Image (cartoon, grey):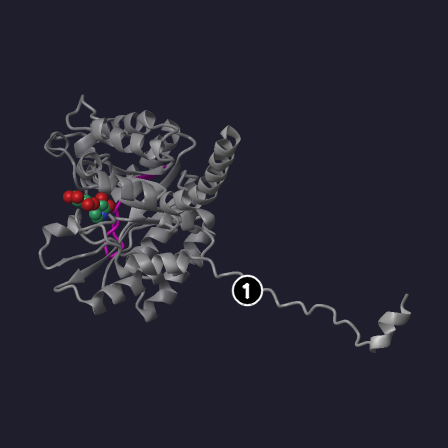
């Protein structure tokens, strides 16, 4: 009797074991590929800007980030006014939260940004600084911020948006008081503070060929070649919308040409703030157009060896800096309920490897036809 029970028990156990593993793996494996998994298979880095409030308060925001991306850029928290709110005070609280989150999830960080003419604290803009005083402030800022993240933030946008559409210097506090040398100084100090970090110049509407991108190209060439300034890469922001984007057919060749000349200077090219705004009502047609633009930006970048980093300036329409403007928005690849939009599907499709071709069926060697008696005489 006991033997019977044991036998029935064993059969039962075997049955359970043979069914259980399949049902567990189907439920728990997350079998759908993500942007992150597809990018990692291709050796690409794909990321998003991060806002602190949703990161700390909306679990879906944090989960989606960790699932879909392998690099993050703090959207605001490393900017001068947040990280250096008074002359003798640095506040790393929120920027640290983002860097911690990135590290916990095996992601890299793009530091953004050390020198810009916007988002400056009033103690800085209202001070009547001499040139030497402002140089000392900038040096202290760069040493302190880059030093704080030494070994943790691998890429820095050192100088942001320093050139106008006409290819002139932006008349910022830095340019007006220090002179154009502030750019060279900033790169050198950042390099001294973390010699392993890769240092970028970052700007918008400099993707194609125009006065601005010419000035940036010539400026970086001069700084690298004749001044040996440690500049390792260029950030092309890639803010776009359905009517104005660098990937209208006639401009696509220009973007490729611009990327090629920048790559020849030995620069890494990062797409740093990609988004594609939709004006007015959001229709299926516009969402499809948006998807085409996202896909072609990525296609163009990946056609250049030096371009393997693609960062979007957000990922859900729920939290978007475009939300301040009521006539434009819906710029990202997930909607306000974290549902994937056609742009997401287009990128996934684009990154999904072609299936291996079916191997040609090998014909089994055919037995020669033998008369029935052959089998008999064979013995
Ligand atoms: C924007 C942020 O997204 C906003 O939240 C903030 O109010 C203003 O700055 N180019 C840049 C980014 O380099 O730092 C800007 O970010 C967008 C344009």
Residue 247 x, y percent position in the rendering: 32, 65
Q: Nearer the viewer, residue 69 or 87?
A: 69
Q: Is residue 351 left or right of residue 248?
A: right
Q: Nearer the viewer, residue 130 or 248?
A: 248
Tell whether position 167 is magenta.
yes
Q: For the point 32% across and 29% down, which residue is it?
A: 146
Q: For the point 35% across and 57% down, which residue is it?
A: 347
Residue 181 x, y percent position in the rendering: 30, 39
Q: For the point 14% across and 58% down, which residue is it?
A: 328
Q: Secondary structure at mark 1?
A: loop
In the image, the residue with mark 1 has its CB under 8 Å from the nearest atom of ligand 1: no
Q: Is residue 67 above or below residue 153?
A: below
Residue 221 in view, yes or no: no
Q: Quadrant of residue 144?
A: top left
Residue 280 x, y percent position in the rendering: 12, 64
Number of numbered discs: 1
In this figure, which residue is indicated by the disc labeled 1? Answer: 357
Q: Is residue 11 above or below residue 165?
A: above
> If the picture is divided into quarters, which one holds ligand 1?
top left
Residue 369 in view, yes or no: yes
Residue 83 x, y percent position in the rendering: 21, 30
Magenta region, residue range: 155-168
Q: For the point 52% across and 35% down, which residue is it?
A: 7
Q: Nearer the viewer, residue 216 or 25?
A: 25
Q: Is residue 192 above or below residue 26?
A: above
Question: Which class describes the residues within 10 Å of circle 1: few (<14), some (14-19), or many (20+)?
Answer: few
């Amino acid at each position: 009797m006991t033997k019977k029970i044991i036998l029935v028990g064993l059969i039962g156990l075997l049955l359970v074991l043979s069914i259980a593993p399949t049902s567990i793996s189907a439920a728990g494996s997350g079998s759908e590929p993500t942007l992150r998994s597809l990018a990692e298979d291709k050796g690409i880095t794909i990321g998003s800007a991060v806002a602190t409030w949703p990161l700390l308060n909306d679990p879906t925001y944090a989960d989606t980030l960790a699932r879909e991306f392998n690099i993050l850029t703090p959207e605001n928290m490393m900017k001068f006014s947040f990280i250096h709110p008074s002359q003798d005070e640095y506040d790393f609280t929120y920027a640290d939260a983002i860097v911690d989150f990135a590290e916990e999830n095996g992601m890299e960080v793009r530091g953004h940004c050390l020198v810009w003419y916007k988002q400056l604290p009033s103690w800085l803009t209202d001070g009547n600084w001499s040139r030497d005083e402002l140089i000392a402030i900038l040096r202290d800022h760069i040493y302190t911020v880059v030093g704080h993240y030494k070994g943790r933030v691998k890429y820095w946008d050192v100088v942001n948006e320093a050139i106008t559409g006409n290819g002139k210097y932006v008349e910022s506090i830095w340019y007006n008081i220090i002179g154009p040398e502030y750019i060279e100084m900033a790169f050198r100090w950042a390099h001294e503070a973390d010699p392993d970090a890769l240092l970028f110049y970052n700007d918008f509407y400099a993707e194609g060929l125009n006065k601005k991108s010419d000035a940036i190209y010539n400026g970086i060439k001069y700084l690298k070649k004749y001044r040996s300034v440690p500049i390792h890469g260029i950030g092309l922001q890639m803010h776009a919308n359905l009517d104005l984007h660098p990937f209208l057919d006639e401009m696509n060749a220009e973007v490729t040409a611009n990327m090629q000349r920048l790559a020849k200077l030995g620069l890494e090219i990062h797409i740093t703030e990609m988004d594609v705004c939709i004006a007015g009502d959001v229709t299926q047609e516009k969402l499809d157009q948006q998807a085409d633009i996202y896909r072609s930006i990525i296609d163009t970048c990946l056609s250049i060896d030096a371009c393997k980093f693609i960062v979007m300036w957000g990922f859900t329409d729920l939290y978007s800096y475009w939300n301040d403007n009521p006539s434009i928005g819906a710029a990202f690849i997930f909607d306000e309920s974290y549902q994937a939009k056609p742009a997401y599907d287009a990128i996934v499709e684009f990154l999904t490897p072609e299936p291996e071709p079916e191997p040609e069926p090998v014909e089994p060697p055919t037995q020669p036809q033998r008369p029935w008696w052959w089998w008999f005489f064979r013995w």
